Amino acid sequence: MDKEKVYYIIREDVLPEAVKKTLIMKKALEENPKLSILEASKRFDLSRSAFYKYKDTIFPIQDIQRQSILSLSIDVDDIPGILGKILRIVNDEKCSVLTIHQTVPINARATIIISLEIDAEHTNIEKLTKQIKNLEFVNGIKVIGVSM
């Protein structure tokens, strides 16, 4: 049974030298795809085994994905074009659609479940949901999940 991973935020000045060099080497390899791991190891005076040991375990905090997933349940009247109007708002707010599911209309109403990738720093969820709620033929909207 795998033990659950625990993560920490730690200041750079207390990291071992091999971990610091791994970060530098990863950046160099990312910036120059023609650079081999062997060449980078020599350039930054870090053994390949140390690089491989740490490369998948250390990341600069700014590299941590700032994207979040927002899931909405939207109750709508079954009229042509309502989904398009919702998607225009989503686009205007710079969100990316991950999934869309629309129920079969019953009594001229349907529910749209939409999952969006949002920028946690720049997307105002309240503004987004209010704009959708204010659309004609939208009867209600609920945030059913947010993951960071």
Image (tube, rainbow, N blue to C red):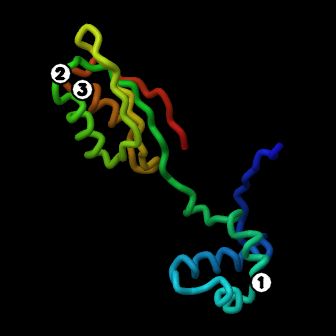
The residues bearing labels 1 and 2 have C-alpha atoms spaced at a distance of: 64 Å
Q: How many marks?
A: 3
Of 65 and 113, the residue lying toward us: 113
Q: Secondary structure at mark 2?
A: loop
From this view, report whether residue 98 is shown above or below residue 39.
above
Asked if the residue under mark 2 is in contact with the one under mark 1, i.e. CB atoms within 8 Å, the reply is no
Judging by the rendered image, the residue that carries numbered circle 2 is 79
Which residue occupies the foreground of this view, 140 or 4? 4
Residue drawn at x 49%, y 45% is 68
* Image position, residue 43 (x, y; %): 67, 91
| Nearer the camera: disc 2 or disc 3 | 2
Residue 86 position in % (x across, y down)? 26, 34
Where disc 3 sits, the SS reads: loop
| Residue 51 in view (yes/no) | yes
Residue denoted by label 1: 47
Disc number placed over residue 113 in the picture, else none: none
Closest to the camera, between mark 3 and mark 1, is 1
In the image, farthest residue toward the front = 104
Which residue is pictured at 36% across the width and 47% down the height?
96
Tell me which label, 3 or 1, sits earlier in the chain: 1
Residue 62 vertical placement versus 73 (above, below): below
Residue located farthest toward the left when viewing the structure as drawn: 80
In the image, is 48 to the left or to the right of 31? right
Is 61 placed left or right of 118 in the picture?
right
x and y, in percent, of residue 80 in the image: 16, 26
Residue 134: numbered disc: 3
Q: Earlier in the sequence, mark 2 or mark 3?
A: 2
Check disc 2: other Cα within 10 Å, few if <14, some if 14-19, many if 20+: few
Give the residue displayed 69% in from the left and 69% down from the top.
55
